[in-house]
Amino acid sequence: MMNLKSIGNLTLKSAAIGAALLLATQIQAANTLRWSSAGDALTMDPHAQNETPTINMNRQVYDTLIQRDQNLKMEPGLALSWEPLSATQWQFNLRRGVTFHDGSAFSAEDVKFSIERAQANTSDFKAYVNTIESVEIIDDYTVLINTITPDPILPSYLTFVFMMDQTWSLTHKVSSPQDYNSSEETYAVRHANGTGAYSLLEREPDLKTVLQKNPNYWGPAAQIETIIHTPIASAPTRIAALLSNELDFVLDPPIQDLKRLDGEESIDVTSVPQIRTIFLGLDQGAKRLRSNPELGKNPLADKRVRKAMYMAIDIRAIKQKIMRGLAEPAGIITAPGVNGYNKALDSRLPYDRKQAKALLTQAGYPEGFKIRLDCPNNRYINDEAICQAVVSMLSKIDIKVSLNAQPKSIFFKTVGNNDSDFYLLGWGVATLDSEYVFRYLLNTRSDKIGTWNRANFSNAEVDQLIAKIQQEVDLAKRDQMIEQVWKITKEDITYLPLHHQVISWAMSSKLSLPIVASNEPLFRLATYKK
Amino acid sequence: MGAIGLAMYKYLLQRLVQGILVMLVVTFVAFAIFHFLGDPVNNMVGESATDADRQMVRLQLGLDEPVIVQYFKFVGNILQGDFGISYRTRTSVIEQMAVRLPATLELSLVSGFFSILFGIPMGIYCALQPKSWLSRNFLVGSLVGISIPTFLSGLLLIYLFSVTLGWLPSQGRGGLVSLGWWDTSLVTLKGWSYIIMPALTLCIYQLTLITRMVRAEMQEVIRTDYIKFARARGLSNYIVQYRHALQNSLVPVVTIIGLQLGTVVAFSIITETVFNWPGLGQMFIQSIEFVDIPVMSAYLIFVGAFFVILNLIVDLVYALVDPRLRAA
């Protein structure tokens, strides 16, 4: 009893002192945004990791030649304008008077340096700039980019190539991204010198990152002085911190908490369909099933079987029961907002268990078959629960599915090694162009292209179309070919689309921050309501 | 003196060699297990990499070599003091651990302190007043305490003290004062406001253990002849219970507390995750998710070494206490 009382006293005292501290720092706090997400940026080196949380953090500090606004429309960044001079040559006119955080001026030299740095062997963005043959400096504010082959989506790719200061990079010996093999940390891992709206003030990996407003930013000045990011891996803790006003913004609230959060007066929840589609992959190219070799042949090679599986999935149940309404059922494996998407393509085959069963019988499997479904359990929203639902839905047409749900590090190894017959995957589209889907998921697989085509789908016509799409500069013609690829693969039922993921952000109701479908907050647009 | 000294050295040497063997086995098993944890390369290169890129990174890291070769290279580097660089954050592993070590040690010590502070009096009370309702409540309550998993008890505390009452911060480690390379949260009130909930959560298990051990040991000691004799001599109740009974029952308890400290350090993983406490356990979890082999190996070596050293100390203490061991 005594102990309890003294603890009570202690907390009261600490609360009083806390309140006093709070008063003292209130002026500062009003202009600070404290936010959290499950993971931290892996590095501040802007070319070392092509991974969303890392890009998120770097985008506050570094700028690109072309950037995307809150509606994902391209807008001038460090380049004021750009135009193709020929099929393989682009001219970029740079913004004048831009300075890096250390005060040095931004010029054409930095552009050439940064693009070449992004092409380095240790860069994680080299796939985005591998069509670039050379960068020519015309004068301090004009550069020409020559491409090996015509590249109509170069501007899209350039929205990911951050501009670094050449002098700073040379001084600190970071003229190429970190080598995996080196045993020393490079300077750019914890330090940054960009042109962005915020500069890096403090960086403790996995613990805390503090950004400070850049007073010399070239664009409209940011409203919030300080941004503090604290990664919190445990979702309930993240939400508790938001509820107890220790955070102003949570990037990734779990969907089961959204209703409750929205009910709180002090918290707002906003949602938007994300550029990511969840689907099931079926290996139609394998000779026989790895998970059921006794079957002799591969049932997935038969389109009727794929169609039967498609039609046995009750997508509305998945949307309502598992995704709590926060998903858009999908007919193709790319989301609205991506070039080449259209509403007509995005229609599903009906959910019809009887017809599914009939198709399966026609295909010669009246009693179904056994198969294993590989599924990640910590990658996409409710991924494992979706897989469980699929297992039970397919069992209704007598396909006996054993579920193999694993953490993403093992799951991607299984799929990457081509060891899966049947798997769940999600695909986001960084360039917002269908080509990004085709290149990785539909082109015949080789070690350069078709990396994630584990359906082992191979169609000569599709491959030819993709090669043309990658080079066609006449956009109308190009869009036509894109539509053709979608039609062929939709007809083939190469993948079983499930839904477009919807993302939600939770924030203090005093904060105004536009939600972006790429799941990248633009803190330079954040304000506190008066 | 000389003979005893020699026997002691021999004993010590024996224990050291055993310790090193244990460490080798622990690290090798851990290293072999990593192969089933998945492929770090996928996490490292991102989705846009081609198969050729992946293969290149795999070669760079030597992941294509047999496990045994990788293991020996790894041990060789460690012997040269090189723990390598984290695959995930590209920062020095040893530095990363040095930053997090104070957080874990402080949490463990405070939690150990709480469990002793509450556990011993509760155990004594339960032994001396076995029939009182308070004793029964202590015992039942402690059972409930260990039956609730840590992540749940932690969240309940957060819900009560942070979300509902708003008294304590829900997560993190604040109010730090830097003492050289050691950042401590124990010298400010603010620091204590951060540590108190995770420490309480972590101490529940130890608390139950200590309460029950003290109770059992004391009940046994009280029944022994010398206690009866002490009473017969007419010593006061206080002297009998606290000087004789308690002191004699504490010896095994202290040993267990010492060994348990290792467990607390090693298994603070869940508590650290729930409270976002920036310690070694949290680092370990993050490294598992990413298959960050250098960090995982370093952590396992650290925990292994910690246990081996604790055991060594306990063995030494036994040797000092038990004359039979000294003579052998």
Image (cartoon, coloured by chain):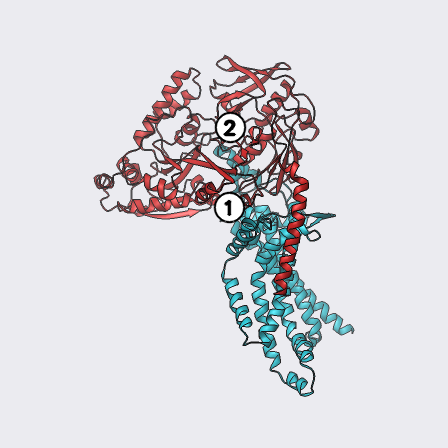
Residue at 26% in and 47% down = A398
Chain A colour is red
Give the CA distance from mark 1 to mark 2: 33 Å
Which chain does tag 1 point to?
A
Which numbered disc, 1 or 2, marks the residue that appears first in the sequence? 2
Residue at 49% in and 23% down = A156
Q: What residue type is labelled 1?
A: Ala
Q: Which amino acid does label 2 sit on?
A: Ala
Q: Mark 2 points at which residue?
A: A127
The nearer-to-camera label among 1 and 2 is: 1
Q: In terms of secondary structure, where does tag 1 sit?
A: helix
Q: Name the image quarter holding the C terminus of chain A.
A: top right
Which chain does tag 2 point to?
A
Q: Name the residue under label 1.
A: A235
Chain letter for the cyan colouring in the rendering: B
Count neighbours of disc 1 (C-alpha within 10 A) and say few if under 14, some if 14 to 19, many if 20 or more.
some
Rendered location of residue A452, percent (x, y) = 43, 34
